[in-house]
Image (cartoon, rainbow, N blue to C red):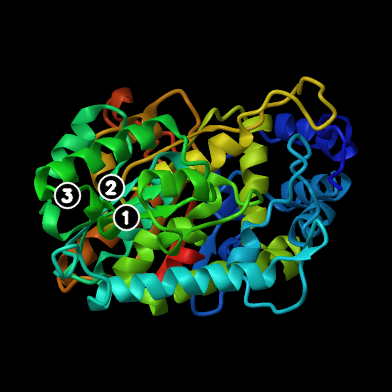
Amino acid sequence: MLSRVNPTQTKAWKALEAHAAATSDRHLRDLFAADPARFDRMHVRLEDLLLFDYAKHRVDETTLDLLAKLFEECGVAEGFRSQLDGAAINETEGRAVLHTALRSSSTEALLVDGQDVRPLIARERDRMLDFAEAVRKGDVRSASGEKFKHVVNIGIGGSDLGPRMAVEALKPFAHRGIQMHFVANVDGADLHETLQLVDPARTLFLVASKTFTTQETMANAEAARTWLVQHLGDPGVVADHFAALSTNLAKVEAFGISAERTFGFWDWVGGRYSVWSSIGLPLAIAIGADGFSAFLAGAERIDRHAAETPFRQNIPWLMAALGIWYRNFLGAATHAVLPYDQYLHRFAAFLQQMDMESNGKYLDRSGQRVTYATGPVVWGEPGTNGQHAFYQLIHQGTELIPSDFIASVVPQHPLHAHHAKLLSNFLAQTESLMMGRPEANSPFRVFEGNRPTSTLLFDALTPEALGA
């Protein structure tokens, strides 16, 4: 089970508080000037997949050692191992948290309540991918015998944010003969405007709701069903034009969708992590079974990296530790996610839910009110758009805003001159935020710098890279 240690009562926490006070006047310019090899020690290269540079953070060797000690005192490694092994670490609901199993290629038995879930995962994934390929190839057709040209995913929260983000991110790998659409909001404008874009005779609707009772999703699904029947004139067409991503088979069948077109997942899959389950069907239709498998493989690579790598080379652990440092010891209330890639324009929204829904708690596992900050507000937009919107606040505002800069070396489009300009902005912003501009003709033109950033650099934005 997970540790019940109050982190604020550990030796490491007390030492971090003292360390933060003692180093509050240091500047990143000085850290780099005193240590020319700083980047060499403070970056991680994950094989051919990505580079993580954390040298431009307000940390030194002491900071990192104390954060590692905090993780040790709080039993983070043991807790992560328990999660991977299927322990019921979701103690309030008595459930395992096993989205990691969805992307694992291991055949070793993984027991949840005495049942090996590996075969269940493989069987449901195969069903889902077979259906996705059949839609792509035209083997699954509309009531009139036509290939589907439009796929509309109806879902909200994790049933929308993950698939929508991934489909947008991997457009260069998508089947161009099938147009993907997403409807989430119960505001009728969302569904109405989407239905203006699609041909009822060639549209497949995916209704994504684990319980098949989510208010927004079912309101939209029922309205879409009515619209379809009105246009095609036969209630029987629902079976040909709808599929469900749900575990409530009785309600799905009552809606008019067959069991063969229902793809399930389990209560140990949280919605915000469900894109790797059957909820990822829109992505599988878009990029195909091979692409979806590569997406899973990327996630499995980072899972293994997180489980097997020492703290100082462990990208997820370092990012988590830096988040704790800034939120609890340097007072940073927000965290910006800044992808310099238009294909990742929904990435910040996806991470926003994953982080803020996970950390939006005020009680600890013992039911006691916490006395520390559990997480920041996560937000962001793609570069360079953000530079003309809110970077002013990051550069010169009174709030400390740690930022993640994300980019790929090679673009997934042929406009390489554009990409060169994009990367020059990407690199210039991280340098400017770090170094600042202390000398200027007017104090209003001074940039203090010392604004922390991470750099995440992919070789290319591929399904595997996105999965990681």
Query: Can you identify the residue that label 1 sits on?
Result: 340
In the rendered image, residue 214, in percent from the top left (x then y), is placed at 45, 34
Q: Which mark is residue 182?
A: 2
At x 52% / y 60%, what residue is drawn? 277
Is 256 situated left or right of 364 in this image? left
Q: Are marks 2 and 1 in contact (CB under 8 Å)?
A: no
| Within-10-Å neighbours for mark 3: few <14, some 14–19, many 20+ | few
Does 7 appear above or below 60?
A: above
| Within-10-Å neighbours for mark 1: few <14, some 14–19, many 20+ | many
In the rendered image, residue 37, in percent from the top left (x then y), is placed at 60, 66
Give whichever of discs 1 and 3 has the lower sequence position.
3
Query: Can you identify the residue that label 3 sits on?
Result: 234
What element does badge 2 sit on?
strand
What element does badge 3 sit on?
loop
Q: Which mark is residue 149?
A: none
What element does badge 1 sit on?
loop
Q: Amino acid at mark 2?
A: Phe
In the rendered image, residue 101, in percent from the top left (x then y), is placed at 65, 65
Q: Nearer the viewer, residue 226 or 360?
A: 226
At x 9% / y 43%, what residue is drawn? 196
